[in-house]
Image: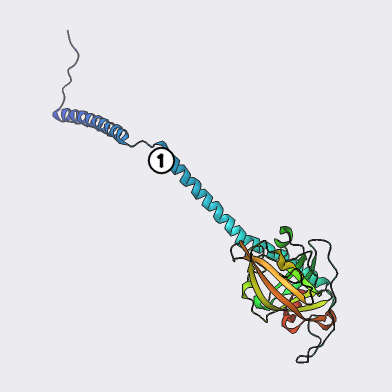
C-alpha cells in the first residue's frame, strides 16, 4: 500500500522557513514589550488633581478677560474717536452750509480793529442736541474746529463734541457761558485743554457773528464742584459784569477722578457781515467748502 508522497525539503527551503518563524516570533515579542512599556508609563503618569484643573481654568478665563479688555480699550480710544469725528464733521458741514456770510475778513489786512459795540446775546436753544455754533482754538491745532451743541448728556458729548450747559449763559451774554467735552474718547474735543496758556484766543462762531475769548487760567477741582458753572465762577454771591467762557473736562488725561476747568473772558466780537477773524478765516472757509 502506497502512502502519501514524501516531501523532501532542500536545505535552502529549511533555512528560509526557520528565518520566517524567528522573524514572526521576534515581532510578537517586540509588540508585547512595547505594550508593557506603555502600561508602565501610564501607571507612572501623575494624575491631574482638582487644584491643578482649577488653576488651568482660571488661567484661561484671565486670558479671555484680558483679550476682551484690550478690545474694549481699542474701541474706547480708537473707534469712538473715528465714529465721533465723522459725526462732528457732518455737523460742521451742515452748519457751514446754512451759514450766511463771507468766509474771509472784509477789512483790509493791517487795518485797525473796529469796535462793533455791545455784542448780541444769542437766543436760548431749547432743543438738546441742536448744533448752534462752532468753536475754534488755534492752540489745539491750525485746523481745529468743533461743533457747539446744546446739552451735556452723554448722547450729545459722545457724538457732537462741545456741549453747552443748559443753565449757563449763551454766547455774548454777561455771565458764564460754560461748555463740556471729552479728552481721550468720542472725538477727544478737549484733549489739549491743559496746553492753553494765558493770552490764547478761543473763537465762537454763531449765526450772529464771531465772539473772541481770551484764556486766563485753569483749575483742577473735584467732580462735585458745580460752583465753577456759576455766573461768576466759584463766587456764589458775586454779580457778573464780564462775559466768561468756561470749558470743563475730565482730569487726569486718562482718568476721571478730577475735573480740569479752563477760564476765559470775552475780548471782542464782530458780526457775520464783517467776516471771520483772520486767525480762523482759513478754517471757516474750509468748513464752508465741504458744505
Instruction: Evaluate whether residue 183 shows in this view.
Output: no
Toward which corner of the image does residue 278 lie, by quadrant? bottom right
Q: Position of residue 125 (x, y in %)?
A: 83, 65
Q: Quadrant of the N terminus?
A: top left
Q: For this view, does 20 lie left or right of residue 209?
A: left
Q: Position of residue 221 (x, y in %)?
A: 64, 66
The residue nearer to you, when weighing 79 against 26, is 79
Q: Position of residue 39 (x, y in %)?
A: 30, 32
- Where 53 sits versus 74, above or below? above
Q: For this view, does 99 lie left or right of residue 27?
A: right
- Where 258 sits versus 113, above or below? above
The residue nearer to you, when weighing 151 against 44, is 151
* Farthest residue, direction top: 1
Q: Position of residue 163 (x, y in %)?
A: 74, 65
The residue nearer to you, when weighing 166 against 230, is 230
Residue at coordinates 78% horizontally, 91% vertically from top-left? 112
Disc 1 target residue = 52
Q: For this view, does 90 lie left or right of residue 208?
A: left
Amino acid at each position: 500500500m502506497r502512502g502519501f508522497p514524501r516531501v523532501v525539503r532542500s536545505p535552502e527551503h529549511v533555512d528560509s522557513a526557520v528565518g520566517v518563524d524567528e522573524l514572526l516570533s521576534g515581532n510578537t515579542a517586540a509588540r508585547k514589550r512595547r505594550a508593557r512599556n506603555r502600561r508602565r508609563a501610564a501607571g507612572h503618569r501623575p494624575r491631574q488633581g482638582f487644584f491643578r484643573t482649577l488653576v488651568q481654568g482660571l488661567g484661561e478665563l484671565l486670558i479671555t478677560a484680558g483679550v476682551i479688555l484690550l478690545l474694549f480699550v481699542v474701541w474706547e480710544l480708537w473707534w469712538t474717536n473715528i465714529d465721533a469725528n465723522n459725526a462732528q464733521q457732518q455737523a460742521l458741514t451742515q452748519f457751514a452750509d446754512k451759514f450766511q456770510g463771507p468766509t474771509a475778513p472784509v477789512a483790509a489786512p493791517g487795518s485797525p480793529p473796529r469796535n462793533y459795540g455791545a455784542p448780541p446775546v444769542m437766543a436760548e436753544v431749547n432743543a438738546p442736541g441742536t448744533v448752534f455754533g462752532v468753536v475754534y482754538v488755534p492752540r489745539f491745532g491750525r485746523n481745529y474746529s468743533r461743533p457747539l451743541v446744546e446739552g451735556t448728556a452723554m448722547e450729545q458729548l459722545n457724538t457732537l463734541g462741545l456741549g453747552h450747559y443748559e443753565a449757563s449763559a449763551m454766547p455774548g451774554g454777561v455771565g458764564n457761558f460754560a461748555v463740556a467735552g471729552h479728552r481721550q474718547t468720542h472725538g477727544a474735543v478737549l484733549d489739549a485743554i491743559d496746553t492753553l496758556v494765558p493770552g490764547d484766543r478761543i473763537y465762537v462762531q454763531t449765526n450772529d457773528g464771531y465772539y473772541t475769548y481770551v484764556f486766563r487760567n485753569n483749575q483742577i477741582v473735584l467732580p462735585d464742584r458745580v460752583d465753577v458753572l456759576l455766573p461768576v465762577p466759584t463766587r456764589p454771591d458775586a454779580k457778573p459784569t464780564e462775559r466768561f467762557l468756561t470749558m470743563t473736562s475730565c482730569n487726569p488725561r486718562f482718568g476721571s477722578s478730577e475735573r480740569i476747568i479752563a477760564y476765559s473772558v470775552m475780548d471782542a466780537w464782530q458780526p457775520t457781515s464783517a467776516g471771520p477773524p483772520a486767525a480762523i478765516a482759513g478754517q471757516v472757509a474750509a468748513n464752508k467748502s465741504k458744505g
